[in-house]
Image (cartoon, helix red, strand yellow):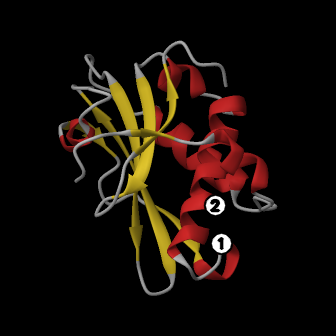
């Protein structure tokens, strides 16, 4: 994992134009995931992304460490959704990894703005996203507005 976190360029968000057909299912998955026993001491959350042949999969983790200058904080998870991943079909998001990433960012940002349990995520120090074998970007940090 890279040694520094990046803060997502919000101009990128303005360029996105997906219909987010999957948002209701994504919101239910996040709600259900955050309804389980969440350990105390989580400092930041990250949405890990995985690419498969036909889809992008999302895993939610909570880490007991956070350092804006070291993205390895996301490797220290004390909570994760395990095998309960959310699937974004490539037919919906697009076949390029950038398409999957942008679609996932839109889902997460929409959830942070409107999700039933978004307050739990926003009670942490930060919320990030990234492919597990790539860069981690921060979508939100304490003190930022959604």
Direction bottom: furthest residue: 53
The residue indicated by pointer 1 is 93
Label pair 2/1, CB-CB below 8 angstroms: yes
| Displayed quadrant of residue 109 | top right
Element under disc 1: helix
Mark 2 lies on residue: 103
Is residue 66 positioned above or below 132 on the image? above
Residue ID at (27%, 40%)? 71
Residue depicted at x 54% and y 62%: 101
**Residue 140 in the image, given as x and y percentages of width and height:** 53, 29
The disc label shown at residue 141, or none: none
Between residues 27 and 5, which one lies in front from this camera angle? 5
Q: Nearer the viewer, residue 111 or 40?
A: 111
Crowd class of label 2 (few under 14; some 14 to 19; many from 20; radius 10 Å)? many
Q: Where is residue 144 shown, x and y percent of the image?
A: 58, 18
- Image side of residue 104 versus residue 115, left or right: left
- Is 68 left or right of 110, judged from the image as shown? left
Q: Position of residue 143 (x, y in %)?
A: 54, 12
Above or below, 85 against 126 in this view is below
Q: Nearer the viewer, residue 92 or 68?
A: 68
């Amino acid at each position: 994992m890279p040694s520094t976190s990046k803060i997502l360029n919000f101009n990128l968000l303005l360029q996105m134009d997906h219909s987010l057909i999957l948002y209701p299912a994504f919101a239910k998955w996040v709600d259900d995931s955050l309804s389980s026993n969440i350990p105390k001491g989580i400092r930041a959350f990250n949405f890990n992304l995985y690419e498969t042949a036909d889809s992008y999969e999302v895993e939610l983790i909570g880490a007991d460490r956070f350092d804006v200058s070291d993205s390895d904080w996301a490797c220290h998870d004390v909570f994760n959704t395990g095998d309960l991943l959310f699937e974004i079909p490539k037919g919906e998001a697009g076949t390029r990894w950038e398409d999957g990433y942008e679609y996932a960012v839109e889902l997460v940002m929409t959830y942070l703005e409107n999700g039933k349990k978004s307050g739990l995520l926003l009670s942490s120090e930060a919320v990030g996203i990234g492919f597990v074998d790539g860069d981690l970007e921060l979508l939100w940090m304490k003190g930022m507005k959604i």
